Amino acid sequence: MMKALFVMAAPFAAFLCAATPVAAQSVFDGTWKVDTSTAQFGGKPMIRTLKAGKYSCVSCPEPWTIAADGAFHPIKGDPYTDDVSVTVIDPMTVKFSYRKAGKVNGDEVWTVSSDKNVVTQKGEDSSSGNGTPVTYETQQTRVAAAPAGAHAISGSWRGKSGATVSDSGTMVTFRTEGDNLTMTYPTGESVTARFGGPAVTMANDPGNTMVKFVRTGPSSFVSTMMREGKVASVTTVTVRPDGRTLDYSNDNKRNGSTAKFTATKQ
């Protein structure tokens, strides 16, 4: 399931740990918004197969296969999703629906281009802490061909820049106070942690993510996010000298993908 840029799957987690007192106004404080046109994706591609009536998420942290019959079927390995339904609309189009605790929390439609080299994913994700929806339209470029006889969405894919994502999925607010940093998303998740302290559980996060922060310079930090005692992602953030732009680099340890982009202070 798609998780928007700042929210969830590759979250813009966190802040710094300081050996010296924190200034009243940190360079990090404020609300930041992703510039999706700057996004660069790398690492392992997304691999999926839809063939002979079955859909497989090959590159998922815990690979799974379900019948593509329009009914909901249980999956494992996604803290935000219990069940998925896959409906084949036509040879180039597939609809996915996602459910958690019996409630649908996302729908998306994947449409492959006529040359079969680009897939567009358009949908809405309400799996966040307070249920605020994130709407999006993203694209991925084909990296490897589909297996013979498979549906056009099959094969290996990697993200493209220029996604259209609602503000609820591209914004985050930071506030430093003494030795503590508070991070808040429009979708309800938040965390307040002591700089240099232990990992803290993110409030209102259905995935029970824990976050810890390490400062690496006057205007940079590394954030580590964990689930069930395992590292989920490592993120490096650097504020440029203009004080208005952030460089963001995320290494997703669960699926081996990477993402880089900038964000602008609002």
Image (tube, helix red, strand yellow):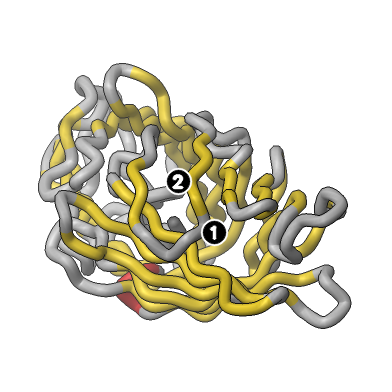
Residue with the mark numbered 2 = 219
Q: For the residue marked with disc 2, what is the amino acid? A: Ser
Residue that appears at 34% across and 56% down: 72
Q: Are marks 2 and 1 in contact (CB under 8 Å)?
A: yes
Residue holding disc 1: 241
The image shows residue 83, relative to residue 122, as above or below, that is above
Report whether 186 appears left or right of 224. left
- Could you tell me which secondary element the residue under label 2 belongs to? loop
Q: Nearer the viewer, residue 40 or 265?
A: 40
- Residue type marked 1: Pro
Residue 239, x across and y down, in percent: 49, 54
Tag 1, which secondary structure? loop
In the rendered image, which quarter is residue 203 located in? top left
Q: Quadrant of the N terminus?
A: bottom left
- In the rendered view, does 9 fall on the left or right side of 20? right
- Is residue 24 visible in the rendered image? The answer is no
In the rendering, which numbered label is found on residue 132?
none
- Measuring from the top left, give residue 249's x and y in whole percent: 57, 46
Q: Residue at x 18, y 41 (%)?
A: 202
Position above or below: 215 against 160: above
Above-or-below relation of 139 to 22: below
